[in-house]
Amino acid sequence: MGKHYDHIPANIVSWIQDQKIFYVATAPLLEDGHVNMSPKGCSDTFHVVFDEDDDDSFGAKDGVSDPADEGDARKKVARKSRAVWYEDMSGSGIETISHLKENGRITVMFVAFEGPPQIVRLFGTGKVYEFGTPEYEELLPLDKRQPGSRAVIWVDVYKVGTSCGFSIPFFDYSRPRNKLHRLAAFSEQKDYDNDNMTSNKEEKEKDQGGGAGVPGLRQFWKTYNLKSLDGLPGLEVAYTSSVPFNDWKSTGKVWDADDETIRSKSRSKEGGGATLSLVTGQGLGWDLGKVLVGFGAGLVVSSVCLDYYSVLYNVTER
């Protein structure tokens, strides 16, 4: 049976730290507004704040777990928690941030895809600290933020719910995706190079807001992240901030290209495609023909997309 707590118990904290994906749900106050659910999966973006004192402030002094020092973080799992935060990565939507700015309501959900079944929901009140704000910089200084990071989402948890998850299928975790990091790093490099080339103050201020012909991350934020689907305000600080991005060329960090042709082991073991062909009587040859046609079309589309991004972001395959 499900259980509820007014905090995150120590054993659940430990389990959360092992998960590779989580989901966040928010909604506007508008009666017919868009309810949003977003998956989050980049490594080392989710952090647990451990109870140490009654101070309402935030930061390392309050026991924020640091994945860069996982050994110490693991030692802290004996403590419970009432707050979490995650590094919000750039995307074409801004629903979560817009909803939190309006009403603060948020639910974070974790699901077990291996081991014993379990679903955990963190019901909380969220705050948004955009890139370029003091709160963001305290939690994510330049040497710790990931390329594409646009905000910190801080959640004060008031209720934790657990449920069985008996119907959730098993999945094998393979590896993280690097595509977002690769595109974001090249986009930020555009902004960094532009900032260092622009000496005139007025021109620099214009370019930092996403001037024409500057295909950087600030321009992306300005184009896609200013308003939600319901017209609520999204990013307000990040795209105008004078805080510099990392010079990713000088860091030596490399994110290899993803191999998107590898199918999951779970799907290949199911054999669903062959069974369906036999049941419908269409024949394996007919079904295979459809697969090959679809695969060929997918290769063409993928090739065009990769060429486009390579030109736009000057991406070099590694």
Image (cartoon, rainbow, N blue to C red):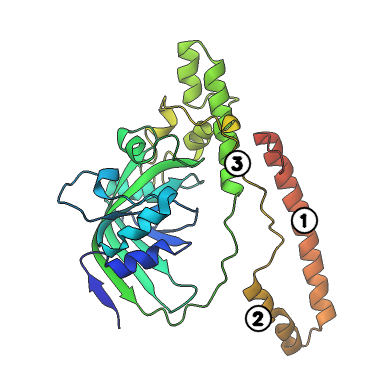
Q: Decide which of tag 3 and tag 2 comes sooner along the chain.
A: 3
Q: Regarding mark 3 in the picture, which secondary structure is present there?
A: helix
- Image point 36% across, 55% down: which residue? 73
Nearer the observer, 318 or 225: 318
Neighbour tally class for label 2: few under 14, some 14-19, many 20 plus, Cα within 10 Å: few
Q: Is residue 274 above or below residue 237?
A: below
- Residue on which the image places disc 2: 270
Q: Regarding mark 2 in the picture, which secondary structure is present there?
A: helix
Q: Which amino acid is tagged 1? A: Leu
- Image point 50% across, 46% down: which residue? 91
Q: Which amino acid is tagged 3? A: Leu
Position of residue 194 measured from the top left corner of the image (x, y, whole percent): 56, 22
- Left or right: where 40 falls relative to 47: right
Neighbour tally class for label 3: few under 14, some 14-19, many 20 plus, Cα within 10 Å: many
Q: Evaluate whether residue 29 shows in this view.
A: no
Mark 1–mark 2 Cα distance, whole angstroms, equals 24 Å
- Residue on which the image places disc 3: 183
Q: Decide which of tag 1 and tag 2 comes sooner along the chain.
A: 2
- Left or right: where 60 falls relative to 286: left
- The quadrant the N terminus occupies is bottom left
- Residue on which the image places disc 1: 299
Q: Regarding mark 1 in the picture, which secondary structure is present there?
A: helix
Q: Decide which of tag 1 and tag 3 comes sooner along the chain.
A: 3
Position of residue 240 measured from the top left corner of the image (x, y, whole percent): 42, 27
Q: Which amino acid is tagged 2? A: Glu
